[in-house]
Amino acid sequence: MDPKTHPYITTGLYESKFGIDQDSAVEAFKIASKLPNLKILGIDMHIGSQITEVSAFREAVILMNELIEKLRMEGIEINHFDVGGGLGVQYNDEQVPDVFEYANAIKDELKKSKCKIIFEPGRYLTADAGALVTKTLYVKNHRDKNFLIVDAAVNDLMRPAFYNAYHHILPVKQTDREKIVYDIVGPACETGDFFAKGREFYKTERNELIAIMSAGAYGFCMSSNYNSRRRVPEILVDVDKFYLIRQRETFEDLIKGEKIIDEIFT
Ligand SMILES: Cc1ncc(COP(=O)(O)O)c(C=O)c1O
């Protein structure tokens, strides 16, 4: 089924690598039910991520209920129904449902399943809880382009490079300076190392802090050491207090686990 989200985060289509399609599922459950070391407890779905139309969830739950019914007719007991995650959040100006709309769209169908219901929301819980704060390194003007080069890079937040994703970007200190159009980019050796392209942003100098918003989901956990960059520290802010909850990586962290094979170099 098509949840109408970015193709890279669509999981419920026949062409995607995930799951077992509806037609083969009953057969797969029948095989599983005969295996002595397996106990069937329930059924799980996950149709994709960043889904903004609750009708997609409803359609999927209806299909799953049909499947649960078929399995029960085969004598296979299904006790839990895990509806996965996927509820979208607002990155730009997209219309997103809230949890009440989500619940209203699926609750009657979920009741029919007579299962214990499990949810796996990810992004909905954490995306807006995190911002990537970065310092401007350099402003480069090139013909009619203005590049705002910051010290975060694609390895720290890869959503723009990966999905051409939009993130709001704000100055850390409020300002009423005039705005110009920038490409806001990192210092890594990739043209895909960008956070925003053609974005109107306040005129900014070197060494100013800017915040890339909604970075709490698929941000740090997708980060890497590409370009031998140490991953960023994580800071928990609790109203007017803050705590370091993950320290910045060190050079030693970068080479941890690497080995020099002496016999090759002697
Ligand atoms: C099986 C499963 N459940 C839940 C999630 C969380 O998805 P989201 O962050 O879109 O809610 C994912 C994400 O890929 C997933 O694969």
Image (cartoon, grey):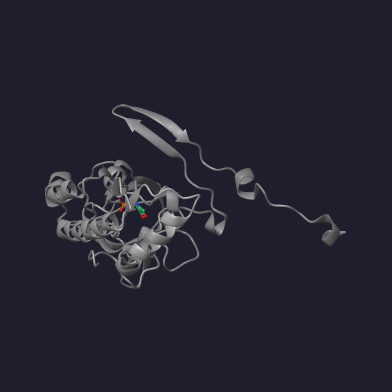
Where residue 23 sits: x, y (%)? 31, 69
Where residue 75 sits: x, y (%)? 31, 54
Q: Residue at the far top: name it.
A: 241
Q: Quadrant of residue 28?
A: bottom left
Vertical placement of 208 versus 143: above or below? above
Q: Residue at the far right: name it.
A: 266
Q: Residue at x 49, y 51 (%)?
A: 36
Is 238 left, or right, of 101 in this rendering? right
Q: Quadrant of residue 166?
A: bottom left
Q: Residue at x 43, y 49 (%)?
A: 221
Q: Residue at x 38, y 34 (%)?
A: 236
Check the picture and name the quadrant holding the C terminus. Answer: bottom right
Would residue 140 be visible to someone looking at this image?
no
Q: How many marks?
A: 0
Q: Residue at x 44, y 56 (%)?
A: 34
Check the picture and name the quadrant holding the N terminus. Answer: bottom left
Where residue 207 sits: x, y (%)? 40, 47
Q: Closer to the camera, 62 or 71?
A: 71
Where residue 154 sits: x, y (%)? 43, 58
Would residue 178 be visible to someone looking at this image?
yes
